[in-house]
Amino acid sequence: MGVRGDPVRTGLTVIAYITAKVNCQEELRGALLDLVAQTRKENGCINYDLHQSQENKSKFVIYENWNKVADLDAHAKSAHLQAFTKNTAHLLESRAEITKWSTVSELSR
């Protein structure tokens, strides 16, 4: 059973904070958009949304929700995420900060 009786949403949220090196924003943005397209096809992916800071174009956030932990674990091991990590390391200012969250309030519709 999901959060507050919702069988689809479990409240498993991941937020990834990513910062591009100077002059690498556009290349990283393109790679991130490719990652988004591939990840959205994965089993258990509810949403996988890329955001870019309006104040600092080097900063990106991916907001993602998953049906269950096993789906997120499969994503972490997916070939496309492994390739993205390997192929974009040189574009990153620092390692991405990945945070996991649980829903506390009822989900909005």
Image: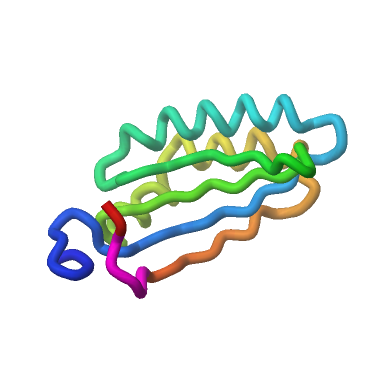
Q: Where are the magenta residues, as a range?
A: 103-107
Q: Main secondary structure of the magenta part?
A: loop
Task: Give the residue at the far right of this rendering.
Answer: 22
Above/below status of 72 relative to 47: below
Who's the residue at 43% across and 42% down the image? 48
- 30 vs 81, left or right, is right
Who's the residue at 37% across and 43% down the image? 47
Q: Quadrant of the N terminus?
A: bottom left
* Image position, residue 2 (x, y; %): 18, 64
Q: Is residue 38 magenta?
A: no
Who's the residue at 54% across and 35% down the image? 83
- 84 vs 65, left or right, is right
* Image position, residue 80 (x, y; %): 47, 34
Above/below status of 101 relative to 97: below
Res 13 quadrant in image = bottom left
Res 67 quadrant in image = bottom left
Above/below status of 81 relative to 98: above
* Image position, residue 46 (x, y; %): 30, 46
